[in-house]
Image (spheres, rainbow, N blue to C red):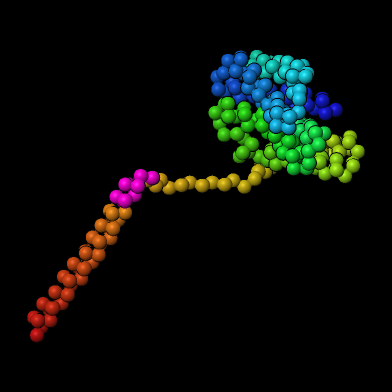
Amino acid sequence: MLTVLYVIGITAEAMTAALAAGRQRMDLFGVSMIACVTALGGGTVRDLLLGHYPLRWVAEPIFLLIVVGAALVTVFASFLMAYFRTIFLILDAIGLAAFSVLGTQVALSGGHGLVIACMAAVVTGVSGGVMRDILCDRVPLVFSDELYASIALIAGLSYSAMHLADVPENLAVIITLSSAFILRILAIYYSISLPVFEYQEREISRDPAGRLTMWMLNKAGVRRREMRKRTVGNTQQRRRARTNRTEG
């Protein structure tokens, strides 16, 4: 079952990546590369970090052919893609759930603990999309869009907890896949995301001489204002004195 969902996931990722490459006016080689990086990049990064060899697409090149084929089909059928946006979102949610479970399984089978298993789920689920967005010169969507990486983390934590609790393998997989898929769909439908941090720094001169100059000008301005106040005060006092002498 996981293999079928994995194929669905990499196909959906390859097709959305091909569309992203098309928006940047890439040639067919660029489209194929972006599709491969997006669909297979998460698992590749995970396996390299965990020392898990051979890489899955190296051991089973059929997955590489599926990704390239899906990307090329997208290029020649791009005029139809706008009608399948909802389907893509659903397939992407399925892929995220499958990638997260597979990443967790690889980490646990390698003897790693809960923390590494959860990180493996996140890396597998989001690294491909992050690399796609960087190569397409835009801020990765997983950093500012609806819940995505968080769902991969929850899926990894859920599966790891059930694995440690000796829950039957198939049951743990079904529960994790279902919960991750439902969470992703709800996040899309209700636009649920993590709080956004926004910080805008005022432009301040980093030149020491410039800061010294501004400090001197500010001081001079303060002195001028003080001298102006004193001048006005002295003038008012002289006027009062003249008035008093005249009345006297």
- In the picture, the quarter occupied by the N terminus is top right
Which x, y percent locates residue 172? 86, 38
Residue 235 seen by the camera: yes
Query: Height in image: 47 above or below 166?
Result: above
Query: As drawn, is 70 to the left or to the right of 243?
Result: right
Residue 118 is one of the magenta-drawn residues: no
Please provide percent x and percent y for residue 203.
Answer: 41, 45
- Which residue is farthest bottom? 248
Q: Where is residue 130 in the image (x, y as percent from the top left)?
A: 63, 32
Residue shown at 21%/64% (left/top)? 227
Above-or-below relation of 91 to 242:
above
Q: Give left or right: position of 150 versus 235.
A: right
What's the magenta region? 206-214
**Number of numbered discs on residues:** 0
Quarter of the figure with residue 47: top right
**Residue name at image x 67 percent, y 15 percent:** 72
Q: In this view, does 245 lie above or below 105?
A: below
Q: Residue at x 13, y 78 (%)?
A: 241
Q: Is residue 32 left or right of residue 61?
A: left
Task: Name the foreground residue: 207 vs 81.
Answer: 207
The quadrant where residue 89 appears: top right
Viewer-nearest residue: 196 or 120: 120
Report if residue 211 lies within the magenta region: yes
**What secondary structure is the stretch in magenta mostly built from?**
helix
The quarter of the rendered structure image containing the C terminus is bottom left
Residue at 78% across, 42% down: 114
Residue 16 appears anywhere in the view? no
Residue 115 spot, x, y in % from top left: 74, 42
